[in-house]
Amino acid sequence: MQQYKEEFIHFMVKCDVLKFGDFTLKSGRKSPFFMNAGAYVTGAQLAKLGEYYAKAIYDKYGADFDVLFGPAYKGIPLSVATTIAFDRLYGKEIRYCSNRKEEKDHGDTGILLGSKIQDGDRVVIIEDVTTSGKSIEETYPIVKAQGDVEVLGLMVSLNRMERGKTEQCALDEIREVYGMETGAIVTMEEVVECLYNKECEGRIVIDDAMKEKIDRYYEEYGART
């Protein structure tokens, strides 16, 4: 596992973004873990988060793209922090763009915040986590409606590796449906590998009992392909 991935896993736990326990997801599934990117609340945390995203995006897509699109609302700070980090780490100016929930009809009109998307732009979409793929159903048409643009792919922070609408995980479904690449900074498999019976922030967050809960969860909801 690359060092920045292991650092990111510890970072999520330290920021109380990745939690282990008993949680009910929007889907109704009972999950032993939960990730909430809204828990990144300080400038230092967002700066560091942007670096992790930038490294993962660079590893997956290189620097040959123009716009980083972060869907409202959580995607807005993600896109801003990551474009800043991308410039600092790789010396490449990437424009950030996000959407409004409601189209604005005065002043800076339209549905977009930040840079407008133009014909010929190559776009990477950035999100926190994708479980069912529902958010990309809303985001992809918004980006494509802006002109003759190419959506290179999607980057999320955590691949939960559970079934979406089919037996595949949501990221694999998105890749097949939209014909674009998908990636994650880390997968849950890597999280377990990194944390199982190993100290993190002064404690063991995945002990034998929690590992058994995670295994049972994936027996029921894990992606089959």
Image (cartoon, rainbow, N blue to C red):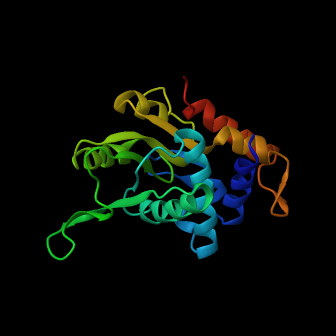
Residue nearer the viewer, 220 or 7:
7
Q: Relative to residue 15, is residue 120 drawn left or right?
A: left
Farthest residue, direction left: 105
Q: Position of residue 218 (x, y in %)?
A: 62, 34
Quadrant for the C terminus in the image: top right
Q: Relative to residue 28, is residue 157 drawn left or right?
A: right
Q: Relative to residue 125, is residue 29 drawn left or right?
A: right
Farthest residue, direction front: 91
Quadrant for the N terminus in the image: top right
Q: Position of residue 214 (x, y in %)?
A: 68, 41
9 above or below 133? below
From where the camera sits, is residue 39 visible?
yes
From where the camera sits, is residue 159 visible?
no
Q: Relative to residue 16, is residue 123 drawn left or right?
A: left
Q: Position of residue 176 (x, y in %)?
A: 40, 27
How many callouts does the rendering have?
0
Identify the residue at horizontal 18%, vertical 77% (top origin).
107
Residue nearer the viewer, 174 or 200:
174
Identify the residue at horizontal 39%, vertical 63% (top origin).
73
Residue nearer the viewer, 128 or 146:
146
Q: Position of residue 13 (x, y in %)?
A: 70, 60
